[in-house]
Image (spheres, rainbow, N blue to C red):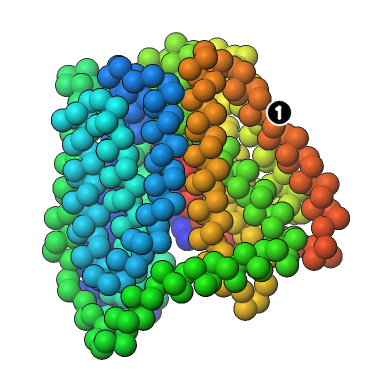
Amino acid sequence: MIRPIAGLRAARGPRASGVSLTPRARRIIRLNNGFQLLFNLLWWMPVFYAYQREAGLSDGQIFGIQSIYYIAFCLFEIPTGIVADRIGARNCLRAGAVVMTAANLAPVLAPSYTGFLVHFLAIAAGRSLTSGAASAYLYDGLAAEGAGEHYLKAEGQARALGLAAKVLCWPLVGPLMALAHPTPYVLSAASAAGSLVCAVVLPRQAAPAGRAEAKATSRGGLVFLRDAATALRCVWATPWLALLMVQGVAVFTLSRICQVNLFQPVLLDHGIPEGSHGGVLAAMTVAEAVASARPQWLGSRLSPVAWVSLLSLAMAAALAGSTLGGPWTVVALLCVFAAVTGFAYPLQRKLVNDAIPAGAPRATLLSVESIVDRAVCALAAVAAGAYLSAGRLDALLWHSAVVTGVVMLVLQLVLRRAPGRPRKQPAPDPVPELVTTAGNP
């Protein structure tokens, strides 16, 4: 991928790197940048918890909706992928933008439990529709123009622009809400509508012809289930891979629940006003992005598995520490937590990829792991809601830290004795990658 600062510079426009870009390819890149930026610009992310509380929802209802969202995201992944194959990537992007626009208007029209539930279910559907379609359209579009080598750079540009937009816009949410309370959701709907405009004017691509291909796509669900069964057998036969996936699920769940679901309750509990939450989330996003682009800072004294365990313990310590300090200490620890996540998450993904045996269904294995991640997040969200409903936020953070520490220590001991463990694990490649989970539902 790209370095954050280099990515922001690259976002000014593509430079020829060997094959000059045609006008059509440049148009595809510009419209992809616009679509990705606007579609993913959720103005309400820093304040959605407080917004729902002010609408009369309890902590149990708020986190119950989050749990349903995670489950829905899992369930929508497979059928929306089949839909994308059937109707084409461009039409899938359009459908996703329409759904996202309607989703962001739901809380404005119905600020109730039902309205927010519909909102998050539609968000899950919209994100599932576009999750793979955007990359597929960009890849195929550039390849058709003989500019396939520009794909990674174009993806990096889109991510960098999206990151810059969030960092610039989120701090404005508080002042804008003071002018008009529903502003974050109205602006999110306007952004999604802008992404729809980008999707509508995307150049048409040649669709694959032939009934044979249509029949192949119609069997997409059966193919996935067959590959999923093969993937599960592969995990069962490779204990080292299974343990790494468990480690990855633990890291992902901890980072997702803290940075998306709990950071607002933590800030409010320490008296940090709602209007400042956007700035805090922007700072966390920058911290995570910078760390994820600097894997070489970790050094090579420890193995990658040991680094992930150590970083996970640091995440747990940051969680526990947030119960002891004042407002500024809490903000600093949340940024430290985000930075540590930035180091751990890409390294964990590389470990899993390296552990997948040759010939195994790699994409399906990673998809299954992602579905398990979301399912565990759904359970964690329910537990978090129960703690908050009982007014036990500090206990939740301490218990999460203790459980994380115990799980990681046990996993580290088991991993050292697991069959199939490489005698000498390769050091992580110092390849910068722009990864951010903060502020991504």
Which quadrant holds residue 358?
bottom right
Q: Position of residue 326 (x, y in %)?
A: 55, 12
Q: Position of residue 173 (x, y in %)?
A: 28, 27
**Mark 1, residue position:** 402
Q: Position of residue 202 (x, y in %)?
A: 18, 66
Question: Viewed as shown, does residue 286 lie left or right of 401?
Answer: left
Position of residue 296 relative to residue 206, above or below, is above
Question: Viewed as shown, does residue 124 lie left or right of 102?
Answer: right
Screen quadrant of the C terminus: top left
Q: Is residue 283 visible?
A: no
Number of dots carrying numbers: 1
In-front residue for pair 375/161: 375
Position of residue 126 relative to residue 180, above or below, is below
In-front residue for pair 28/410: 410
Residue for point 69% across, 32% down: 403
Which quadrant holds residue 56?
top left
Q: Residues within 10 Å of mark 1 (few under 14, many from 20)?
A: some
Residue for point 36% across, 81% down: 216
Position of residue 109 relative to residue 419, above or below, is above
Q: Amino acid at mark 1?
A: Val
Residue for point 18% across, 36% down: 105
Residue for point 66% across, 68% down: 234
Q: Position of residue 42 (x, y in %)?
A: 30, 39
SS of the residue under disc 1: helix
Q: Is residue 56 visible?
A: yes
